[in-house]
């Protein structure tokens, strides 16, 4: 029966535990929280990998420990990781909002038995990490030369995948002042600038660099504006007034020993020089072929009509005519070109460079400095040809000149090729270093014993751009100017140089800073003057510093600092406090006089003292530097002084001069009346005062009366304060009340001093010392047989040294008659009564 009850209890406990096993759950703290279940959490796309982002936070109803997990849909990148126990979520993959702006994750929480999984979305917020991207590249625009100014010729489009201000795009033209075009910042519409026109004959092509700039935004904790650039190629189209134009001239054809009649030698191609209403072209051979060649009138293909053995010349120059055919088959404008046909059999021809007009050894080009790297020099139209056959016509192209500035393509040629020169180092193409760049273009045969070669000079004339900042000749300038200089005086001339040419090289100077108020600068020459109204004074301020700015026409600038020192002039004479000085001299001790010079610097403010005249003469010496006056060494007593002078008061006078050491030198004089006394042994300030005032006794009396008055006043104040303090505390009154309340006193005991009191033990036949006296004694006791202990009070009079000593002697002799127990009990009882009386007195006082 007992076992069944135990099993039933265990089964009930198991059932109750099973019913209370609830699943854990996440806290939902909202989108702006950094802990919870990550629902609606957002993270910036420029967040660094490894950054702690969030803390998964939840709880189990039974208080069991929980662990956290995180999974992603199959096939998706796992951007986050979580620490199972702490729930700390960390970024493990870089984010890109433009690729994925929402990440779906499955977060889980489990207590080991129950697991809860929630699907949440994490949003990736934008950062300004994308540059604007141009659409429909490359930008090539064909514009007729008769297009009027202000007309739209093209629309540039660019997109920025960022959001907000970082996704907005505005357009600008680089070097807008030097182009014939303008662009609308918002729409990107390209127009011909007002007042400008296109001319096909002057320039067939224009290159314009367009910049696309976004509105800026934060990226990696910084505010960043992203910019992209592209080149717009604008081809100027000719109006309907031009004849046909052969393309790819000059033309070269070759006849080989293995050629047969009907072989194609070369195909010429011409097009209508006009861009609109193009007419068909008809080709004919005018002369030069000696009947050995024919041409297809439609295709322009030149063919051999005989065997190569019948060709008597090594070179044939065939003049080909290209004619425009009108709608009614009438012949319109025409043009003629020459096709050079070479018979190839021997290596007897070196490589040759050709230009648009035939063989050419010098090629000229004009271009802006610092072109983009990788740009082709389109203005150079160079063809290289070797009229030999096979390996005899294989050669290498080399460009000799400043290293790694340009490169030539192709480097290996068979027979003929168009030569292309490409920019490799834009920095080296600098107008300020070289106005003219000269290169040698070499063509050298590779596999021939003769090693024939050809050379052409490439001359590049550089045009300047505003690529330099004005630069001062020094980072700082030091100037010195005398004080009291007139307004408009020259201070210093500064120089800044802008290596650019024309208006870009002109420098405008300006001045600013807290110390620039008294100065001005010539905007053109850089000369710094004082203001017309300025008055510089070294005694007021001797150091000034300010900044100067050199700026070109486009606002590029540099700074330098100017330090101005105002030189002190000797414009202040020395001055005494008074022209008549009174001094008292003790024999053997000097007296000192002092003059002040207000000049700012040495030696203008250095003073030299001298005695001009004395009465009597040759009695005093003076220290030229300190101004100390003393008697001659032979005067050692007052008797000697009285022997020298007839005056009994011993007062002499000297005229002292104070002269500065400036140039010119200034001086001033003062009369010093000196009273001679003999030392009386008194020292200190009181003695000095008495000596100085011996001729004025009223002054001494006044000072003494003032000192006595101050002492009396201080005494009255201290007494008043002490009286008020004692009146408020009134510590004596309670003690007197305690004494008055004693009913009677049978016997006086004197003890050893305890808390300012005396003790007494037992009776003794010897005479007792006088007992302490209270201010008011109580009446004698009525019953002499009744023993009553005396209560000493705080107000009692403490026994003198003699009484204490006799009391101690008496007490020592009573020790044999009074036991130690009685003495201890008396002392304890006395202490208790004292404490009780003091408490009663205080209570009655405050009541």
Image (spheres, rainbow, N blue to C red):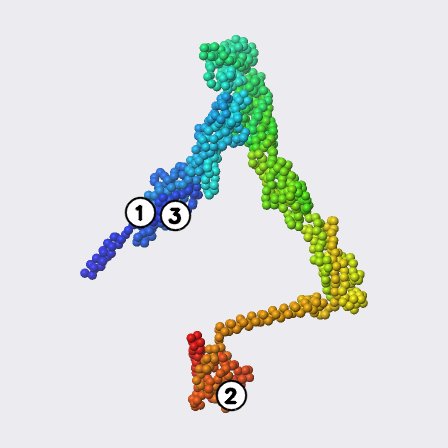
Name the residue that disc number 3 marks: 34
Residue 836 in sight from this viewpoint? yes
Looking at the picture, does residue 621 appear above or below residue 398?
below
Quadrant of the rendered image containing residue 715: bottom right
Viewer-nearest residue: 671 or 103: 671
Q: Please give left or right for residue 679 compared with residue 468 in the image.
A: right
How many C-alpha atoms fall within 10 Å of the one at disc 2: few (<14), some, or many (≥20)? some
Residue 491 numbered tag: none
Which type of secondary structure does the marked residue at label 1 adopt? Answer: strand
Q: Earlier in the sequence, mark 2 or mark 1?
A: 1
Q: Quadrant of the C terminus?
A: bottom left
Name the residue that disc number 1 marks: 116
Q: What is the total number of numbered labels drawn onto the structure image?
A: 3
Viewer-nearest residue: 361 or 431: 431
Name the residue that disc number 2 marks: 768
Q: Please give left or right for residue 34 compared with residue 16 in the image.
A: right
Which type of secondary structure does the marked residue at label 3 adopt? Answer: loop
Q: Quadrant of the N terminus?
A: bottom left
Q: Please give left or right for residue 449 compared with residue 687 in the image.
A: left
Residue drawn at 63 percent across, 46 percent down? 544
Which type of secondary structure does the marked residue at label 2 adopt? Answer: loop
Q: Earlier in the sequence, mark 1 or mark 3?
A: 3
Q: CA distance from mark 2 to mark 1?
A: 103 Å
Q: Nearer the viewer, mark 1 or mark 3?
A: 3
Residue 672 spot, x, y in % from top left: 74, 60
Residue drawn at 48 percent across, 38 percent down? 225
Q: Earlier in the sequence, mark 2 or mark 3?
A: 3
Looking at the picture, does residue 413 appear above or below residue 296?
below
Residue 138 in sight from this viewpoint? no
Viewer-nearest residue: 714 or 622: 714
Looking at the picture, does residue 107 appear above or below residue 614?
above
């Amino acid at each position: 029966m007992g076992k069944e009850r135990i099993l039933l209890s265990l089964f009930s406990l198991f059932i109750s535990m099973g019913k209370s096993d609830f699943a854990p759950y996440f806290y939902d703290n909202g989108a702006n929280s950094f802990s919870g279940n990550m629902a609606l959490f957002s993270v910036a796309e420029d967040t660094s990998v490894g950054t702690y982002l969030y803390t998964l936070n939840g709880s189990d109803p039974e208080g069991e420990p929980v662990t956290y997990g995180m999974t992603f849909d199959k096939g998706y990148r796992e951007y986050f990781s979580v620490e199972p126990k702490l729930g700390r979520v960390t970024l493990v993959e870089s984010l890109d909002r433009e690729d994925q702006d929402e990440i779906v994750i499955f977060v889980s929480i489990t207590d080991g038995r129950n697991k809860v999984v929630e699907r949440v979305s994490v949003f990736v917020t934008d950062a300004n990490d994308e540059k604007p991207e141009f659409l429909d590249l490359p930008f090539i625009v064909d514009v007729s030369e008769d297009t009027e100014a202000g007309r739209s010729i093209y629309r540039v489009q660019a997109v920025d995948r960022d959001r907000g201000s970082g996704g907005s795009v505005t357009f600008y033209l680089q070097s807008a002042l030097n182009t014939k075009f303008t662009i609308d910042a918002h729409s990107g519409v390209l127009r011909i600038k007002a007042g400008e026109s296109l001319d096909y004959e002057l320039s067939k092509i224009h290159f314009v660099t367009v910049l696309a700039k976004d509105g800026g935004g934060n990226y990696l904790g910084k505010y960043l504006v992203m910019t992209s650039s592209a080149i717009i190629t604008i081809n100027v189209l000719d109006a309907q007034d031009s004849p046909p134009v052969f393309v790819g001239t000059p033309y070269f054809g070759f006849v080989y020993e293995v050629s047969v009649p009907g072989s194609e030698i070369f195909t010429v191609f011409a097009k209508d020089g006009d861009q609109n209403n193009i007419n068909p072209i008809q080709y004919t051979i005018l002369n030069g072929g000696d009947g050995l060649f024919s041409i297809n009138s439609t295709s322009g293909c030149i063919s051999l009509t005989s065997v190569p053995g019948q060709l008597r010349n090594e070179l044939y120059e065939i003049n080909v005519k290209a004619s425009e055919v009108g709608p009614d088959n009438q012949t319109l404008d025409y043009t003629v070109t020459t096709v050079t046909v070479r018979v190839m059999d021997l290596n007897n021809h070196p490589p040759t460079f050709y230009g648009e007009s035939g063989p050419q050894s010098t090629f000229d080009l004009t271009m802006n400095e610092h072109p983009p790297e990788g740009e082709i020099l389109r203005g150079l139209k160079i063809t290289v040809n070797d009229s030999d056959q096979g390996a005899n016509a294989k050669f290498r192209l080399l460009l000799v000149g400043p290293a790694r500035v340009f490169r030539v393509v192709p480097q290996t040629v068979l027979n003929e090729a168009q030569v292309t020169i490409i920019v490799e180092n834009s920095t080296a193409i600098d107008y300020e270093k070289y106005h003219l760049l000269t290169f040698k273009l070499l063509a050298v045969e590779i596999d021939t014993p003769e090693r024939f070669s050809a050379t052409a000079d490439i001359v590049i004339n550089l045009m300047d751009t505003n690529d330099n900042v004005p630069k001062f000749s020094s980072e700082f300038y030091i100037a010195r100017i005398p004080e009291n200089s007139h307004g408009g005086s020259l201070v210093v001339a500064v120089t800044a140089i802008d290596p650019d040419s024309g208006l870009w090289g002109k420098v405008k100077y300006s001045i600013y800073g807290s110390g620039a108020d008294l100065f001005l600068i010539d905007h053109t020459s850089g000369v710094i003057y004082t203001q017309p109204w300025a008055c510089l004074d070294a005694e007021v301020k001797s150091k000034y510093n300010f900044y100067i700015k050199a700026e070109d026409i486009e606002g590029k600038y540099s700074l330098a600092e100017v330090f101005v020192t105002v030189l002190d002039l000797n414009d202040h004479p020395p001055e005494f406090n008074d022209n008549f000085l009174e001094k008292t001299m003790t024999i053997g001790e000097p007296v000192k006089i002092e003059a002040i010079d207000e000049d700012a610097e040495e030696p203008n403010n250095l003073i030299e003292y001298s005695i001009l005249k004395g009465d009597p003469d040759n009695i005093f010496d003076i220290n030229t530097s300190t101004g100390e006056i003393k008697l001659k060494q032979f005067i050692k007593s007052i008797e000697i002084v009285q022997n020298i002078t007839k005056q009994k008061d011993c007062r002499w006078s000297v005229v002292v001069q104070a002269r500065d050491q400036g140039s010119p030198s200034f001086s001033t004089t003062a009369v010093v009346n000196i009273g001679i006394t003999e030392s009386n042994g008194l020292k200190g300030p009181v003695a000095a005062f008495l000596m100085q005032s011996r001729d004025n006794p009223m002054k001494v009396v006044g000072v003494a009366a003032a000192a006595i008055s101050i002492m009396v006043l201080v005494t009255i104040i201290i007494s008043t304060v002490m009286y008020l303090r004692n009146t408020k505390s009134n510590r004596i009154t309670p003690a007197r009340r305690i004494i008055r309340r004693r009913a009677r006193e049978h016997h006086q005991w004197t003890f050893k001093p305890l808390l300012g009191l005396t003790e007494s033990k037992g009776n003794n036949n010897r005479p007792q010392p006088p007992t302490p006296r209270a201010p008011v004694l109580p009446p004698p006791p009525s019953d002499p047989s009744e023993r009553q202990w005396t209560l000493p009070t705080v107000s009692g009079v403490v026994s003198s040294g003699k009484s204490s000593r006799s009391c101690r002697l008496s007490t020592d002799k009573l020790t044999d008659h009074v036991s130690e127990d009685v003495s201890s009990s008396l002392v304890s009882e006395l202490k208790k009564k004292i404490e009780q009386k003091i408490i009663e007195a205080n209570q009655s006082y405050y009541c």
